[in-house]
Image (spheres, coloured by chain):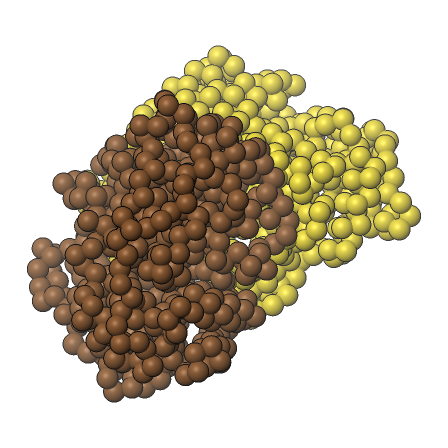
Chain colours: A brown, B yellow
Amino acid sequence: MRSWWGWGTVDQAVSDAECAQLAGQLPGLPDTPLPIPDPGDLDLPAPRTRPPASLAPLCSTSTADRASHAYGKAYRDVVRALHRELPNPPDAVAYPRDERDIASLIDWAADAGVAVVPYGGGSSVVGGVEYRGEHPWLSLDLSTMDQVLDVDTTSKAIRVQAGTLGPALEDQLRPHGFTLRHFPQSFEFSSVGGWLATRAGGHYATLHTHIDDFVESLRVLTPSGVSESLRVPASGAGPSPDRFFLGSEGILGVITEAWLRVRDRPVHKASLSVSFPSFHDGLAAMRTIVQSGLYPANCRLLDQGEAALSGASTDGTSVLVLGFESAYFPVTNQLDVAVDIAREHGGTPAEPSRTDGNGNGADDSAVESWRSAFLRMPYLRDGLARMSAIVETFETACTWDRAEELYKSVADDVGSAVQRVTGSPGMINCRVTHAYPDGLAPYFTVIAAGQRGSEVAMWDEIKAAASESLVRNHATITHHHAVGRDHVPSYEQQRPDPFAAALRHAKAALDPAGVMNPGVLGI
Amino acid sequence: MRSWWGWGTVDQAVSDAECAQLAGQLPGLPDTPLPIPDPGDLDLPAPRTRPPASLAPLCSTSTADRASHAYGKAYRDVVRALHRELPNPPDAVAYPRDERDIASLIDWAADAGVAVVPYGGGSSVVGGVEYRGEHPWLSLDLSTMDQVLDVDTTSKAIRVQAGTLGPALEDQLRPHGFTLRHFPQSFEFSSVGGWLATRAGGHYATLHTHIDDFVESLRVLTPSGVSESLRVPASGAGPSPDRFFLGSEGILGVITEAWLRVRDRPVHKASLSVSFPSFHDGLAAMRTIVQSGLYPANCRLLDQGEAALSGASTDGTSVLVLGFESAYFPVTNQLDVAVDIAREHGGTPAEPSRTDGNGNGADDSAVESWRSAFLRMPYLRDGLARMSAIVETFETACTWDRAEELYKSVADDVGSAVQRVTGSPGMINCRVTHAYPDGLAPYFTVIAAGQRGSEVAMWDEIKAAASESLVRNHATITHHHAVGRDHVPSYEQQRPDPFAAALRHAKAALDPAGVMNPGVLGI
């Protein structure tokens, strides 16, 4: 059973006792966790609109449905839900069975002045599924459209419906020996359509870092008709239609299907971690590895704090986690080259872990424990939120020439904000999650003691400081969390004005009534 | 000295004697080549407009400039020039020195109702630089904006002006040890801005096949202001502005600068060719190689006819040319894996050629002779055109499941058209120039005997048959030659209508006077 207020499933949530334990690490927090409201006890405003009889069977106005679709899963979403602050839930939640249902719902919404917010897994951490305007609104939940419709074993590509969540996708690919290998942290509770609409970041630390790279063609239902791109491996015919809809976050229509490239499941794997005396040395090694033409599947650098927090290192070193994989040939050579580079930059490698061509071999327990911890993190975040700790994760990307200054600058700027807002320094850690020949994607975690009842205001101030720091450092406001509504002010500073005008006019052409997810992308 | 009517430089053009020799292979051609008109003898229509005094010094209305900017370098362009058919040359050719000049020229043009056609190297083979409307028009030649402005040696990226031609770019990168490694066939006579505006295909047969993949950020001067994207290695903030301008072929504005990723010059190389009893077997090998996670820099498959024509094989086999390269580590292992795959599919490898880490070693004479022949081809095409042979090259991409049917279908459809139009079967060859895990990019060459004076009409009919065949086979109308004006009818069949509407509205926002390259992309 899915949690209506927090991450994932109810049975996986941290217990009250665990909450208190988590909070023990942060002085100044309350003794008891915020209680979890029963959705039955919530007093939601009455729905302001009612779909016509023909569409009513697709729609729910139950308190549970409306409450669970009111927010995404950002820290501020979770805290507001825990505080029973749900002043503007969707007036209805629709569960279309197919494109025809979606078209009918949008037609009705356009006529009735109802905003339509596409909802995949609901895992947005940037306000992407939360309408903040004055109109009545409909949350369009695509979860019943969850099928792989075609498998092209020759071209290794699949046609899949947008509402398919990560595990359901992999389950349907497994009998064919295929995998998409797109494993964002939200994997279990995010959808193909959501990944596409937000340009999600996935499994690979290098090369094919975003879902964009796996797209062969998209099918998008706009209020003005269906846009389906030609299914080809590549094209030079005009600006890419797919790249225009990727990242459009629902403002132009609903992505209903996609052809995606898949691959054979890897059986050769080799990985290890390398510790460095300083983050600086680790960065230099990472840069040289990705500039050498190696494409490690895993190439993540943890700074001292992150390494300590995740248990990867307790001696004050920074840790680079390296992993190669292939479905076809051994990858130990590649790992050896990468490790040589790491050594040249002062790194000390741990024992490697390898699997042979049958997928057998010693599991890398460090990698496995990292993976479990990785998937567990959002639950822990919720536990901390229940204790009124402030937790924020934000991520970015910049070129290598700016890397060290960005790292220092963010620590200073966010550190000052945390001190000012909470009265204590809190904790700011960084890991580099993706690496490119010309730059890197750092991911920051901020944890500080908050004050019960003021969590959102405190979070907002720290978030603003973080965003300002990124903009001042010429780093993107988001590498893979999307813009949603929370990142709009910074996004608007970074988006070229002529492109904003182009986007606005394109939206006017495709969504003349302006009902598609108004507010995200500042449009 | 650049040829005003044909490819490249005057001194490289094939002689009259060579023309006759080329034509000897095709029965039914005239005995003598079409003479090369002296631009001084051309009787061009008088310019219909005159830039204001402030801009006049930037503009030329000389016959030589107007004639040489009237067309690109498609077969039909060359033949029309040879026949002195230049009814609609630009009314003026402008040579802006900087963005300010471009802005002034566009402002004037918008006021005066003058169409503006950006011109880089002028190598378009799809009517991209030839205005076909009723208004006066200005050819905007960017050749004086040819500098590398910044080199970021840490991130390995450069800022370069759009008018920079291939050799000038590489010359400026060489002192830094860098190369862009973007070597389209037009390399010597095409520009960075042209590559970007048309999504040009380059050196690499796999992975980074298009210039798109090297773009960090773009600076575009639109009639409504400058669009400059943030310079980051990757971003998930909304739809990519760069991907919207890439392939826009000048309809939204003029690309003036770009930050591009460069790389260290490769010193390790390994290559060889593998012959296959059939094209079918070669395709299977190629598919397995690119689906294995290998990324050969060269992976080109020549069918029987193409292999014979290029001298790669004279025994009726198809030939796969494989090459790996790296600036950092030996690549012989990778070549070995690829060759093993080729063997499993019935291939017979030739002796490999290797260079060590100092770039020393036996040159692969087959690869070198291919490269020279490759760069020589457009000159030969001009020689054949002077003999009134019909020559067309067209290229496409499709998924692997359609590969064999496309190959057969195009041969049938174009073969029938050639027979109908010319009365003889002509020659249709194919090479696969780029390969992807999910598909391939075949490139077709058609040569047939034409009739003097009817060359363009004959070419148009064969071209139409080729384009129809591609569309019917769900293959893109262009993988890397762009849309221009010649491909518009097919492009419009393949472009999703909602995306066309979006593009049209975006153009209206950025170019309200509608003066930017009207007609390309059907907009």
Location of residue B105 in the rendering, given as x and y in whole percent from the top left corner: 79, 47
- Can residue B131 be seen here? The reply is yes
Is A306 situated left or right of B151 in this image?
left
**In the image, is residue B442 above or below residue B371?**
above
Q: Answer with the quarter of the image where residue A429 lies.
A: bottom left
Residue lying furthest right in this view? B53
**In the image, is residue A101 above or below residue A218?**
above
Q: Residue at x 23, y 74 (%)?
A: A20
**In the image, is residue B416 above or below residue A59?**
above
Q: Residue at x 26, y 76 (%)?
A: A31
Number of callouts: 0
- Between residues A399 and B135, which one lies in front from this camera angle? A399
Q: Residue at x 67, y 37 (%)?
A: B508
- Between residues B301 and A345, which one lies in front from this camera angle? A345
Location of residue A297 in the rendering, given as x and y in whole percent from the top left corner: 28, 61
Q: Quadrant of the C terminus of chain B?
A: top right
Q: Residue at x 67, y 43 (%)?
A: B510
Q: Answer with the quarter of the image where residue B308 lies.
A: top left
Is B353 situated left or right of A508 in this image?
left
**In the image, is residue B2 above or below residue B428?**
below
Is A241 situated left or right of B147 in this image?
left
Location of residue A354 in the rendering, given as x and y in whole percent from the top left corner: 14, 66
- Can residue A431 be seen here? The reply is no
- Between residues B374 and A498, which one lies in front from this camera angle? A498
